Image: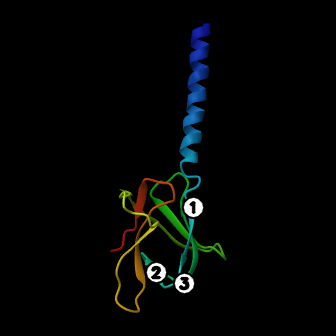
């Protein structure tokens, strides 16, 4: 193998490692803690007042897991729709409306530092 071909192969291997590392790093840091002072709802589950961990599941940019911060018990895991974060949105959770006394639906989560959001599929 010539010197140029060897350098090309080494460069290609190095580039593939960088791409793999950056794709894994894209999900690192996409875990946020959110405290609720009233009942809130995700598809199929009502979250009591408390603190929860919202995180993107590694390798699945549209899969969200929500767990209780104290017990680490997973309370919700589901696919979401990836949406753009509007410039005016500063709250990490977009809440919907609910009748008095009912759990307020969480419509979307905007991970800290991300220009994208994850919209929950309430049906």
Q: Secondary structure at mark 1?
A: strand
What residue sits right under mark 3 in the picture? Answer: 49
User: Which element type, helix, strand or loop, lies under badge 3?
Assistant: loop
Which residue is identified by label 1?
Answer: 31
Q: Nearer the viewer, residue 85 or 60?
A: 85
Horizontal side of residue 62 vs 23, given as left or right: left
Residue labelled with disc 2 = 40
Distance, label 2 to label 1, CA atoms, is 19 Å
Residue at point 42%, 85% (across, down): 103
Residue drawn at (60%, 15%), measured in percent from left and top?
Answer: 7
Seen from the viewer's position, the closer of residues 92 and 27 is 92
Coordinates of residue 39 in the picture (x, y in percent) = 48, 85
Helix, strand or loop at mark 2: strand
Labelled disc at residue 11: none
Q: Nearer the viewer, residue 31 or 42?
A: 31
Q: Earlier in the sequence, mark 2 or mark 1?
A: 1
Residue 20 falls in image quadrant:
top right
Q: Is residue 1 visible?
A: no
């Amino acid at each position: 193998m010539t010197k140029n071909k060897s350098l090309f192969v080494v460069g290609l291997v190095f580039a593939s490692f960088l791409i793999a590392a950056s794709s894994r790093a894209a999900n690192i840091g996409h875990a946020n803690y959110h405290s609720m002072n009233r009942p809130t709802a995700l598809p199929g589950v009502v979250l009591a007042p408390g603190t929860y961990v919202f995180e993107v599941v590694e390798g699945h940019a549209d899969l969200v897991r929500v767990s209780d911060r104290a017990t680490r018990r997973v309370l919700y895991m589901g696919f979401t729709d990836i949406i753009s974060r509007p410039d005016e949105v500063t709250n990490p959770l977009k809440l919907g409306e609910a009748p008095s006394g009912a759990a307020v639906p969480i419509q979307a989560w905007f991970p800290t530092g991300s220009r994208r959001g994850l919209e929950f599929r309430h049906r």
